[in-house]
Image (cartoon, rainbow, N blue to C red):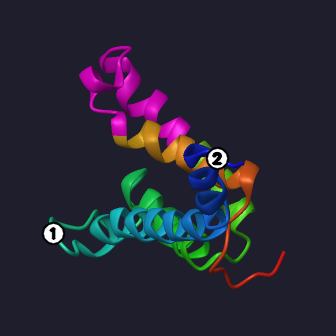
Amino acid sequence: MMTATASLDTRLTAHSASALGVFRILTGLMFTMHGTVKLFGWPTGSPAAMAAWPMWWAGVLEVILGVLVAIGWYARAAAFVASGMMAVAYFWMHFPAGFWPVVNGGETAVLYCFAFLLFVFHGPGALRVSRR
């Protein structure tokens, strides 16, 4: 006889690949949007100056890596680079202002870093372009 919790676990586990895929798409699109703000000032803000280091180049990487993650094409490799990028961003831009992310404004960088690490180790889930 299956308990209610075990039954729920079984039903939820059957949808874990789809849930991971939806999370990957959302994360990739949100990351892409960080890049579009830096490059084009869209949907809000003003763009960084063309080729300005590091903001403009970070925007280029965020758009490219975010799209690759969102569509699930070379998602593990893109997520690996994006995770490293966010770790560098945290330690370069936020960590000097204090250890704790809630104090130094680095929560977004830390969350993206570990979300992308999830895709590196678990793969892209369902709803992806690549079948590998």
**Residue drawn at (65%, 75%), measured in percent from left and top?**
72
Mark identifier at residue 104: none
- Does 98 lie within the magenta span? yes
Residue at the spot x=15%, y=65% of the render? 45
Q: Farthest residue in the left direction?
A: 45
Q: In this view, does 13 lie above or below 87?
A: below
Span colored in magenta: 85-107
Q: What element carries label 1?
A: loop
Dot placed on the residue nearer the N-terminal end, 2 or 1: 2
The kind of residue tagged 1 is: Thr
The outermost residue toward the right is 132
Q: Is residue 124 left or right of residue 104?
A: right
Q: Mark 1 points at which residue?
A: 44
Q: Which residue is tagged 2? A: 6
Q: Is residue 9 magenta?
A: no
Residue 85 seen from this side: no
Residue at 38% from the left image edge and 14% from the top image edge: 99
Residue 81 percent location from the top left of the image: 65, 53
Choose between 110 and 49: the one closer to the eye: 110
Which of the 4 image quarters holds residue 119? bottom right
Residue 12 in view here: yes
Q: Main secondary structure of the magenta part?
A: helix
Q: Nearer the viewer, mark 2 or mark 1?
A: 2
